[in-house]
Amino acid sequence: MAKWLKTQEFITFDVKDKICRITMNRPEKRNALSPQLIKEIHDAMLEADDLVDVHVIVLQGAGNDFCAGYDLAAGYIEVSPEEAKKYRTRMGTFDDDVWTMTRKMHQMLIIPDVHKPVIAKVQGRALAGGSELALACDIVIAADDAEIGHPGVRGLGSPPINFWFYHTGPQWAKRLLLTGDSIRGEDAARIGLVLDSVPAAELDAEVSDLARRIAIVDPEITAANKRVVNIAMELAGARTLQKLATEIDARAHLSQGPLRKKFKGDVKEVGVREAISRRDDLFGGRKPLRIRNGEKK
């Protein structure tokens, strides 16, 4: 009987040959991160970390995408005045916003905290919250044609889980976060946003081979080596930044700029999907940025 994972409504959990595969299983929603899915990922990570038979964890998405982002439809559900008075909500004060987001992000930050290595297998879209989820993992392997980015910075806020700088350095982190442009997997590998990319047809085999090699090593040793790199990142402020990133996102939510106002108005008028389309049309649509030796293609 599972010790941590009580429900599996939106994930599957499989262990074989010392490899645990946690699969986000909302393909009809492009594996968008609902509160329940986030909780199940959190609990599954704890379950895998606790199981003696697991040496390495693979986080993946069912269907065509890794994860297309946060479930904005759930985020824009109207809260009744009675609920707003009784519970902290994002419709309240700045502190309410920080509190509710911190609770949610704390669940996702279990990924760097578990002792066992976590590989993100990224196909299709890894956008907004999906990119945050992938970049929180220890290693990211992407399909060449995967699409990675954070379009939410165009009108919603700032990534509340923010490892961009630690993967790419300051200039590429700024280049992507100041525009919300996405980037293909093969280009993400060139700038260090992901470890490597391979043709989509080879992604399963590539990730399985890496997981198999990691699984050979005693978990106490891989835990030590994951920990030492994480401490090195913390000496560069990585975990402190995650605490600040939530507050910075809440600050960005206070923006009364025209793009944010228009997006919120469009959500109410035409729904989330069309609102995103209208926003991205201002940037020439969703075509990923292409990079070759520092030149835009």
Image (tube, grey):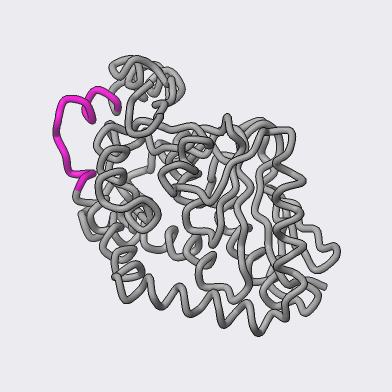
Residue 87 shows in the view: no
The answer to whether 237 is drawn above or below residue 76 in the figure is below
Q: In the image, what residue occupies the spot 40% across and 29% down? A: 292
Indicate yes or no whether the magenta region holds residue 262: yes
Say which of 122 and 110 sits in front. 122
| Residue 114 position in % (x across, y down) | 57, 73
| Residue 180 position in % (x across, y down) | 33, 33
Residue 124 quadrant: top right
Q: In the image, what residue occupies the spot 42% across and 17% down? A: 274
Indicate yes or no whether the magenta region holds residue 279: no
Say which of 130 and 39 sits in front. 130
Say which of 292 and 277 sits in front. 292
Where does the N terminus fall, quadrant-wise?
bottom right
Q: In the image, what residue occupies the spot 44% across and 65% down? A: 106
Q: In the image, what residue occupies the spot 29% across and 40% down? A: 177
- Image side of residue 156 versus residue 216, left or right: left
| Residue 285 position in % (x across, y down) | 39, 16
Q: From which residue to which does the magenta span run?
A: 252-263
The answer to whether 161 is drawn above or below residue 188 in the figure is below
- Image side of residue 113 versus residue 95, left or right: right
Where does the C terminus fall, quadrant-wise?
top left
- Image side of residue 80 versus residue 251, left or right: right
